[in-house]
Amino acid sequence: PLEGRSAIVTGSTSGIGLGIAEALARAGAAVMLNGFGDPMQIEETRTALADANDVDVAYDGADMSDAAAIRRLAERASARFGQVDIVVNNAGIQHVAPIAEFPPAKWDAILAIDLSSAFHLIQATFEPMRQRGFGRIVNIASAHGLIASPFKSAYVAAKHGLVGLTKVVALEGAESGITCNAICPGYVWTPLVEKQIDDQAKSHGIGRDEVIRDVFLKNQPTRRFASVEEMGALTVFLCGEEASSITGTALPVDGGWTAH
Ligand code: NAD
């Protein structure tokens, strides 16, 4: 359904971003990958995606905390593909600590990577989308863009901000064929979640198994982690023609968490 389209997916060397990049490529879109990781492994992912789907797949390692690098990423993608139709702002980091101990440098990094990067990439791609009369912007927020949990001050603030940015961009793009939506996942099993287990265990004073049962899945009524494939499928749908009237939304994909 996305043949002839081209996409940038930030933070797509791992987890949800990689799942979304795979789904977009399978749907026929050219994809610019981004994110950190082992260069050989990234190159393997890039060629595998391109070969399996017969689409152009490129990679740019722009650091999402660097506004100039983000602008260069947008320029490279539009030079390589001719245009950028789809932007998925997915790159994100997390830090879990009580507010009194929360390192200010982590606050700054989370605000930069989880929120400001989306502004910079949207700013760099919005005007050409407007001129062509088509654009799809998907921001990977979080259930924590809608509700809060303790020990995640920066993350909850950044994700609420991303939901707000989503609404503004939706309004500004509404008459130009540009939609902007936020996906708000609950817990999805990825390296980001795996890495949190120890910090959560420390902050709550409990063991690893209890973190999975009593912190991660306690609030997710389905009692299962969502999958990166589910995030990919929703993103492909939002990027299609049939989603033209869906804009400015924050869509929970959280097994019922925010229905509580
Ligand atoms: P992940 O750690 O598996 O992947 C994060 C990706 O972002 C990686 O590709 C990493 O290299 C990249 N990245 C990190 N810092 C970067 C930077 N400065 N510049 C460029 N790339 C950078 O994490 P994930 O779980 O797949 O999370 C992806 C997004 O989904 C994040 O925004 C996260 O907040 C959000 N999210 C995840 C969950 C979950 O349960 N996993 C739930 C809700 C929201």
Image (cartoon, helix red, strand yellow):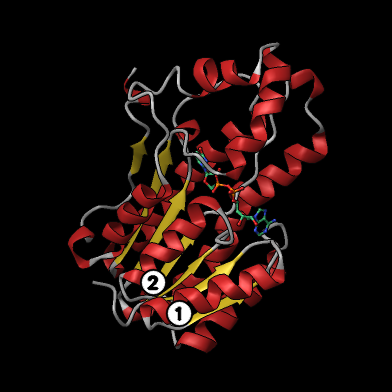
- Find residue 129 and report its horizontal and vertical position in percent: 39, 75
Label 2 secondary element: helix
- Find residue 21 and report its horizontal and vertical position in percent: 45, 64
Q: Quadrant of residue 27?
A: bottom left
Q: Residue at x 30, y 76 (%)?
A: 133
Question: Mark 2 or mark 1: which comes first in sequence?
Answer: 2
Q: Residue furthest left?
A: 242
Amino acid under label 2? Ala
State whether residue 70 is above or below residue 55.
above
- Can you tell me whether the CB of the residue at mark 2 lies under 8 Å from the nearest atom of ligand 1? no
Q: Quadrant of residue 241?
A: bottom left
Q: Residue at x 53, y 51 (%)?
A: 15
Q: Residue at x 45, y 22 (%)?
A: 217
Answer whether residue 124 is visible to the viewer in this image: no
Nearer the observer, 75 or 94: 94
Q: From the image, tell me which residue sits under label 1.
A: 50
State whether residue 129 is above or below residue 163.
below
**Do the numbered discs 2 and 1 sit on residues whose CB atoms are within 8 Å?**
yes
Amino acid under label 1? Ala
- Find residue 137 and report its horizontal and vertical position in percent: 41, 61
Q: From the image, tell me which residue sits under label 2.
A: 25
State whether residue 157 is above or below residue 120.
above
Q: Quadrant of the C terminus?
A: top left
Q: Quadrant of the N terminus?
A: bottom left
Q: Residue at x 37, y 67 (%)?
A: 24
Label 1 secondary element: helix
- Find residue 48 and report its horizontal and vertical position in percent: 49, 75
- Looking at the image, residue 37 sits to the left or right of residue 230; the answer is right
Answer whether residue 235 is visible to the viewer in this image: yes
